[in-house]
Image (cartoon, grey):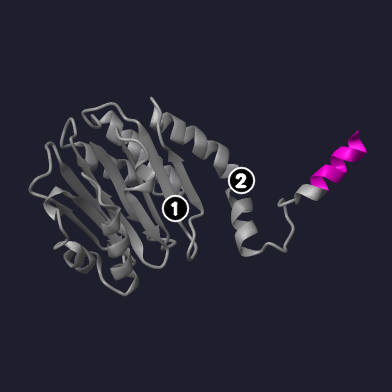
Amino acid sequence: MTFSIALRCPQTGHFGIAGTTSSMAMGARCLFVNHDAGAVITQHRTDPRLGLAALRHLRAGASAEEALAAVASAPGIEWRELAIVDRNGQTAARQGQHQEPIHANAFGPGMVAVGNILRTRDVPAAMIEAAGKAADQPIAERLLAALEAGLAAGGEVFALSSAALRVAEYADFCSVDLRIDKSSEPLADLRRLWEAYAPQQANFVERVLTPDSGGRATNSLDILAREDKQI
């Protein structure tokens, strides 16, 4: 009852991952990404430990296939749906024998999409196609286009409730990490959240990388001082 996509941008080497489901808070449980390793999707009776374990293998130099093989003996693996993109843009996916239908996957250059309890098998392929057509857009836009295309292609059987979007451009933190944890229209809410966040993204990154540089990152005391003068 979830559909997700992970990708590596061939021009920048940056990673993105996004998904949506009828369960709440999928962003905290299903999507794992690190700029120095890759991106991992773990869903269907989700075990977030698999995402963390696969990232560790990727960070140690494993390929997507090798990282997938390394976690494929975990308890309950036949209930799990996994997809991986590694630092070279190679992809891998595994769908367990106990997964509920309809489940499907699709691949593109540096991209993998997976879904379960879908209305049609066309959902992952529609996501890959949409992400490919938006290749000249920022990663976040590509991911949102993919989710919206997945919904238009049929989506999952149940009404969606949560959605999440993550982009890893720098070591050890995500420049975009947006989540809708419970909503009647999580994809529409996620797009609105991204459109509000996008103009501020560079400023938030600046605060991480160069906190002494000034820019728009004005501290609270400066704000209060200006307000006092206006009064």
Residue depicted at x 64% and y 57%: 207
When asked about the image quadrant of residue 208, the answer is bottom right
Q: Which mark is residue 200?
A: 2
State left or right for residue 145 relative to residue 75.
right
Q: Name the quarter where the C terminus is drawn.
A: top right
Q: Which mark is residue 71?
A: none
Would you say the magenta stretch is mainly helix, strand or loop? helix
Mark 1, Cα crowd under 10 Å, few <14 / some 14-19 / many 20+, is many
When asked about the image quadrant of residue 212, the answer is bottom right
Q: Name the quarter where the N terminus is drawn.
A: top left
Mark 2, Cα crowd under 10 Å, few <14 / some 14-19 / many 20+, is few
Q: Position of residue 144 (x, y in %)?
A: 40, 40
Say above or below: 63 vs 118.
below
State left or right for residue 25 relative to residue 176.
left
Q: Position of residue 60 (x, y in %)?
A: 32, 74
Secondary structure beneath dot 2 equals helix
Q: Which residues are magenta?
A: 222-231
Looking at the picture, tell me which residue is in the foreground, 195 or 186: 186
Q: Position of residue 162 (x, y in %)?
A: 37, 35
| Amino acid found under the numbered disc labelled 1 | Val
Mark 1 lies on residue: 167
